[in-house]
Image (cartoon, grey):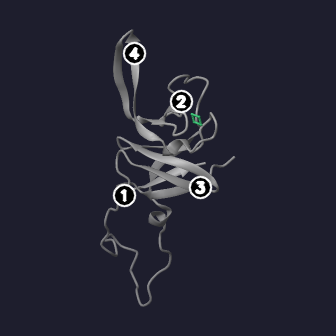
Amino acid sequence: MTKKRFEICPAAEFDAGERRIVDLDGFSVGVFNVDGEYYAMKNDCPHQRAPLCEGKLGGTTESNSPGKYEWVRPGRVVRCPWHGWEFDVTTGESVFNPHKVKAKTFETRVEPSEDENTVADGGCEGCSADLEGDEPPVETYDVEVEQGTVVVYL
Ligand code: FES
């Protein structure tokens, strides 16, 4: 089945540490910029369907021995606003049971906007060019897309 493509916004307008809650074809989705990488997760907690992506975003604690805690995954963990379950937005996995409890995630990329891909077709009135010979008929320029658009696939 072909995935549907949704353009969220220009990457240049979506800073690290930010999130956007967007409606994509009736699905509420949280899109996150974590240290310059983009991730999307369904805004629906697997516990009791709270708007998960609206929860507090931060890190979590881990412990390898009693009484010692370490702050890890800063900016990657969202805490559900209803009962506090924590999920890693980069994988959708819950912190307490990552192999069994997961939030749905979606493929997210930075790509040229479809508008940027549009190539005008046709010529100009009154223009004529001699396309034969060694010299190019017009001066040309290399074009690169420097800033893409954040895109989510559902
Ligand atoms: S609804 Fe999210 S932890 Fe309960």
**Quadrant in the rendering for residue 74:** top left
Residue receiving disc 3: 24
CA separation, marks 4 and 2?
A: 18 Å
Residue receiving disc 2: 93
Between discs 3 and 4, the one toward the N terminus:
3
Does dot 1 land on a helix, a strand or a loop?
A: helix
Q: Residues within 10 Å of mark 1 (few under 14, many from 20)?
A: few
Between discs 1 and 3, the one toward the N terminus:
1
Q: How crowded is mark 3: few (under 14 residues within 10 Å), some or many (20 or more)?
A: some
CA separation, marks 3 and 4?
A: 38 Å
Does dot 3 land on a helix, a strand or a loop?
A: strand
- Proximity of marks 3 and 2: CB atoms separated by less than 8 Å: no
- Proximity of marks 4 and 1: CB atoms separated by less than 8 Å: no
Residue receiving disc 4: 63
CA separation, marks 3 and 2?
A: 22 Å
Queried on whether the Cβ of the residue with tag 3 lies below 8 angstroms from ligand 1, the answer reads no
